[in-house]
Image (cartoon, rainbow, N blue to C red):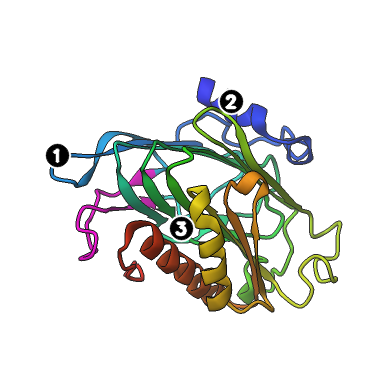
Amino acid sequence: MSDIKLISDETPIEVKKYNSKIEQLEVGKSGKVGILDIELKENEQNKTVITKQFSQVPLQIQRAVYPENSLPGMAYLYIISPSGGILQGDRYKTDIILKNNSTCHITTQGATRIYSMNSNSASQMVNITLDENCYLEYIPDQIIPYQNSRYYQKVNLNIHDNATLIYSEVLTPGRVAMKENFDYDICYLRTYCKNQNSKFRCLENMKIEPKENNMKIKGILGNYDIVGTVYILTKKGKLEKLEKMINEKIEFITSGTSILPNESGIIVKILSNSTEEIYEKIYEIVKITRKEILGADFTKIRKN
């Protein structure tokens, strides 16, 4: 129950206000708390392997696969959920640790669907820790908030100054095909990063309440519906070159890059009306970064 309490205590007041006492399956009951805890290390054959693994439905992970010819020791992991989406009262917690020069690419089986709610809210906490000389690409599929959904996500990034993380998240307006366009109650995304000595690196809060605010005005989303964010946290000496290369490859009109304070990394924002277009740009960023850091090619991932 300590994990449940930890996740609940982290929820902001703007989301907690929806946690009414309408009868439902209680928070903490079987199937309401998903836990995933994995640790990876590079072995003596220069292959990244899972050395610790624990999961609790509805969070699971498939066994590691090694599809890259240019990086035969790089592990690819797929996070899966048999529930198909996140329900009211759900609390998810994922811990990912990379040690001993490990290299890994992690994605999800499909989109994170936040189902409609008439009580409570849903939350997810992701903790990612990278030791020195480790490399991780964490590229989950998009977040789709359904009508009347309430969702809080906190991502804690504990990244060594000499490690590299590419972390992305893509937020859509909802089930557009069902005419649910910005019809959710709240989506609150918080990303906090520090280094191996707990020194602050960066923080971003994105709180969207589309029923309270017009999302289509200038300065918010304007003419676009989908927003993508990419963090590149790596060695300081690589930042200027990487940012220049990224700006040369992606369209500046709908994308922008900034070097984070204290040269702690790069943030990229991408606006579009096409999820596919955003992911093409994210994959291009991964391709550029992997080539610069690891000297290896990136092959677009397959999920079919």
Q: Quadrant of residue 201?
A: top right
Q: CA distance from mark 3 to mark 2?
A: 25 Å
Q: CA distance from mark 2 to mark 1?
A: 37 Å
Closer to viewer: mark 3 or mark 2: 3
Of residues 96 and 285, the one drawn nearer to the viewer in this rendering: 285
Residue at (60, 31) in percent of width and height: 199
* Label 2: how many Cα within 10 Å (few below 14, some 14–19, many 20+): few
Over which residues does the magenta segment extend? 60-79
Q: Quick one: label 3 or label 1, which is nearer the N terminus?
A: 1
* Label 3: how many Cα within 10 Å (few below 14, some 14–19, many 20+): many
Q: Quick one: label 3 or label 2, which is nearer the N terminus?
A: 2
* Label 1: how many Cα within 10 Å (few below 14, some 14–19, many 20+): few
Q: What is the three-letter code of the residue carrying label 1? A: Glu
Closer to viewer: mark 3 or mark 1: 1
Q: CA distance from mark 3 to mark 1?
A: 27 Å
Could you tell whether 184 is left or right of 58 in the image? Answer: right
Which residue does the numbered mark 3 point to in the structure image? 139
Which residue does the numbered mark 2 point to in the structure image? 6
Of residues 242 and 192, the one drawn nearer to the viewer in this rendering: 242
Q: Secondary structure at mark 1?
A: loop
Residue 218: give x, y in percent of width and height: 84, 71
Q: What is the three-letter code of the residue carrying label 2? A: Leu
Which residue does the numbered mark 1 point to in the structure image? 44
Q: Secondary structure at mark 2?
A: helix
